[in-house]
Image (cartoon, coloured by chain):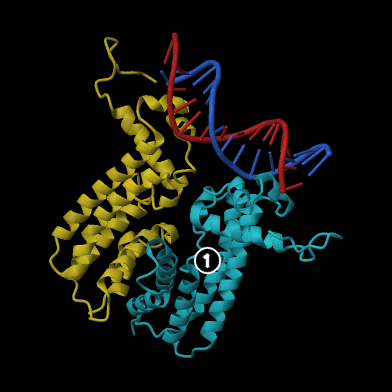
Chain colours: A cyan, B yellow, C red, D blue
Amino acid sequence: MTKPVPPSGPNDEPSSRRRQILEIAAQLFAKKGYRGTSMRDIGEQAGVLGGSLYHHIRSKDALFVELHNAALDRAEERIAAAVRAQSDPWARLYAACATLLDIQLAPGSLTTPMMNDFREVPDDVREQLIARRDRFEGLFRSLVEELPLPAPIDRSIYRNLLLAQLNATADWYRPGKLAPAEIAAQIVAVFRHE
Amino acid sequence: MTKPVPPSGPNDEPSSRRRQILEIAAQLFAKKGYRGTSMRDIGEQAGVLGGSLYHHIRSKDALFVELHNAALDRAEERIAAAVRAQSDPWARLYAACATLLDIQLAPGSLTTPMMNDFREVPDDVREQLIARRDRFEGLFRSLVEELPLPAPIDRSIYRNLLLAQLNATADWYRPGKLAPAEIAAQIVAVFRHE
DNA sequence: CCTACCGATCGGTAGG
DNA sequence: CCTACCGATCGGTAGG
């Protein structure tokens, strides 16, 4: 309960409180969804009234978009790094899937880009989310391009199926039994054709 | 604007109005989600104030559960019939997938069992939805059991992946280019291993 | 960061 | 099926 802040002024790390609030908000959004999370809920977890949050953020919409995009930024970096370390096309695909699932299935994941409830978000927010997500998915576009797939398989549908599969995993996965990497291995096993 | 109802009493099809309201509600729930659809929205589409709906339904929760379960009832029947007509395991799986996607991807589908927004629903409603859905998914359990899959593939995960894939399709599918049956064919092509 | 409040909207009800 | 309303909750703001 000690407050190591010199009496001469406020904390010299000005945005650590903000970061704390962002983490709380990310967890609540991930667990209860956009509409299911009120500013008062976020405030409660932060030990503050809902209205007080507006000193740190501009609006609920802006908060959500910021969290979503930051999560995709980090995910993109990690996946790109994991893919870079592999050269075989299937190994690269597996590296991407395992990294993405590792992020999305992490228990307290503040990086959860699982805000696929695009339907419960205001229209202008949805547009921003979709634009960012489309860019993210471009990463998988080139990975699928590299694969030596049999001719009858349509690469465009294949990519949609794979991405949908990865995004859907968080809905049925329950931690404990299987590690994210094992799920990724099974997904790649199913999607592997040559 | 004529009302072909004898002056001696009310309409002799007592629940056709109710059925009408159920269809409207199903469409709104499918398009805007549970929380995104207000009783006033439903009333507006039905040409009535929100409060007036309570002569036909007990509560918003009960309405949603009724629609969800009725949709799964009908889907189950159609899929069972389609599967019954096939004997080859992969043909049976394809029949089930094509029928389910035909239902879920139909443009104005009032049968859309796409209420996978289990997160935006009250807890006790969610329990009922999940119970019904688990029963529905049992249908696919036996279909996967029949498949001559290679040993390294885990049937339990495989079934989860397949169901997740089918449920996720409605999120990215856009009518016009590809028919539901073609999506089903591609899904089965990806999931086909022996 | 709080008090106190705004206008809007929600599911639902009483009483006709 | 409407009028009129209930208590609750929402995102957000003014003023300190």
- Label 1: which secondary element: loop
Q: Is residue B100 above or below residue B192?
A: above
A80 relative position to B62: left or right = right
D9 relative position to B27: left or right = right
Quarter-of-image position of residue B159? bottom left
Name the residue located 32 percent from the left edge and 46 percent from the top edge: B128
Of the pair C2 and A101, the residue shown nearer to us: C2
Quarter-of-image position of residue B9? top left
Measured as percent of width and height from the top left, residue A115 is found at 52, 59
Question: How dense is the environment of label 1, judged by Cα within 10 Å: few (below 14), some, or many (20 and up)?
Answer: some
Quarter-of-image position of residue B46? top left
B167 relative position to B193: left or right = right
Residue B182 seen in the current view: no
Q: Amino acid at mark 1?
A: Ser
B34 relative position to A34: left or right = left
Name the residue located 28 percent from the left edge and 19 percent from the top edge: B11
In which quadrant is the C terminus of chain B drawn? bottom left
In which quadrant is the N terminus of chain B drawn? top left
Residue marked by disc 1: A109
Residue A177 seen in the current view: yes
Name the residue located 78 percent from the left edge and 62 percent from the top edge: A5
Measured as percent of width and height from the top left, residue B181 is found at 30, 62
Q: Is residue A136 above or below residue C3?
A: below
| Letter of the chain that mark 1 sits on in the rendering | A
